[in-house]
Amino acid sequence: MEGVGLVGLGHMGSAMVERLLHRGFAVHGYDNNPQRRPPTDWQGFTRCDSARAVASECSVVIVSVLTGEQLEDVVLGADGLASAGRSDLLVIDTSTVDPADSERIATELEHHGSQLLRSPVSGGTPEARTGQLLMLISGDEASFERAVRLRGPRRQGILLSRTR
C-alpha cells in the first residue's frame, strides 16, 4: 500500500483521511491537538508524533490547518515537515490562508529542495469523504502530476494554475 501523509486532523483533515483509506492508501497522520487525533481503529492509518515523523514516512503530505502561523510551524518549524530532510517532499497545502504566507513558505521550502502546491478546496467534510472536493491547485506541473494521482483516474474537480 502506498503511503500519503496528512497533517491537520480536524473535521476536514479526518474526512480526507477516510477518503484516502477508502482509496487504498496507507495514511500517516499528525495533529498537534491530541483531541483531534482520529481513532486508532482506522485500518491503514498510522498516528505519528510530529509532522517530521509524517514526512519521514511519506514523500507526499497534505496539510489542512487554519492559519498561516500553523502552516509555517508544521512545514518549517523545528519538528516540521522540512526538518525530515527529504528532497522529494511534496506538500499539498489545502488550508485557506493568506496567499502571501503560503508563497513565502513555498519559497522557503524550495530552499530545502522540496515543493509546495497551494490547493485550497471548495466543499466541506461530506465532499471530502466522497471525493467531491473542488481543488484549486497552483504550482508547477510536475508537482501537480504527482498530486493528482491521489484523486484517481478521473480528474474532475481539479483546476491547475501554473506558477512556474
Image (cartoon, rainbow, N blue to C red):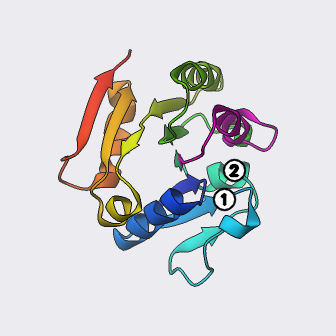
Q: Position of residue 35 (x, y in %)?
A: 72, 69
Residue stretch in magenta: 63-82
Q: Is residue 70 shown in magenta?
A: yes
- Residue kind at label 2, given as amino acid type: Ala
User: Residue tagged by mark 1?
Assistant: 30
Secondary structure of the residue carrying numbered label 1 = strand
- Residue 158 part of the magenta segment: no
Q: Residue at x 53, y 39 (%)?
A: 91
Task: Judge from the rendering whether residue 33 lies leftward or rightward of residue 119; answer left or right.
Answer: right
Residue 29 at x, y percent in the picture: 61, 61
Q: Is residue 7 left or right of residue 134?
A: right
Q: Inspect the image, locate mark 1, and give the three-letter code of the amino acid beneath it.
A: Tyr
- How far is the residue under mark 1 from the one under mark 2? 6 Å
Q: Callout 1: few (<14), some (14-19), or many (20+) C-alpha neighbours within 10 Å?
A: many
Mark 2 lies on residue:
51
Looking at the picture, how far across and down is residue 28, in whole percent? 58, 62
Q: Residue at x 61, y 56 (%)?
A: 57
Q: Is residue 39 visible?
A: yes
On the rendered image, what quadrant is the C terminus found in?
A: top left
- Whether residue 2 is visible: no
Residue at x-position 58% and y-position 22%: 110
At horizontal 75% and vertical 66% (from top left) the residue drawn is 34
